[in-house]
Amino acid sequence: MNIYLAGSYSARKKLADIAMKITQRGHDMHVPAIWLTGKHDDAAPVECATADLQDIKNADMLVLFTEYPGSRGGMYVELGIALAHRIPVIIVGPYTNVFTRLCRRIDSVDEFLDERSK
């Protein structure tokens, strides 16, 4: 399964660790390169956004981590793209707006990882 992780930029290190655990369970992962490199390339925002769009469109599932709040909102753009393309979405954490209520919600990262092991 090809899984795209969406979450706040401030939680990128935690989410990169989660991505590694999911990969170890045999799933393909797509996370924004900035999470893995720690480098924000302001010189190429269009290229970054274009790559993220393509990764979301190619995903079998998007997982949105609302348990790590952020202030920028990019993760909600990713949610909207997934919903528009009818890609299944799982919310890890609380519902945060009306659109997250369209998704399946689970309580924790551990619950999500346990499901990926089955």
Image (spheres, rainbow, N blue to C red):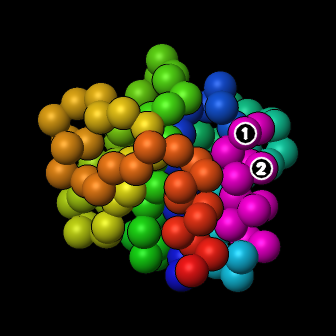
Tell whether 95 sits left or right of 7: left
Q: Are marks 2 and 1 in contact (CB under 8 Å)?
A: yes
Give me the C-alpha separation between circle 2 and circle 1: 5 Å
Q: In this view of the protein, which residue sits in the foreground, 70 or 117?
A: 117
Which image quadrant: the C terminus?
bottom right
Residue 66: percent from the left, percent from the top?
45, 35
Mark 2 is surrounded, within 10 Å at the Cα level, by few (under 14), some (14 to 19) or many (20 or more) other residues, namely: few
Whole-percent x and y of residue 79? Answer: 34, 48
| Residue at point 71%, 76% (across, down) | 25
SS of the residue under disc 1: helix
> Where is residue 53 shown, x and y percent of the image?
45, 59
Please give the range of residues in magenta: 13-24
* Residue tagged 2: 17
**Crowd band around label 1 with a 10 angstrom C-alpha radius: few (<14), some (14–19), many (20+):** few
**Amino acid bearing label 1:** Lys
Q: Residue 21: within the magenta?
A: yes
Label number found at residue 14: 1
**Looking at the image, residue 96 lies above or below residue 112:** above
Q: Magenta part mainly helix, strand or loop?
A: helix
At x 50%, y 23%, the residue is: 69
Q: For this view, does 53 lie left or right of residue 15?
A: left
Tally the numbered discs.
Answer: 2
Residue 55 in view here: no
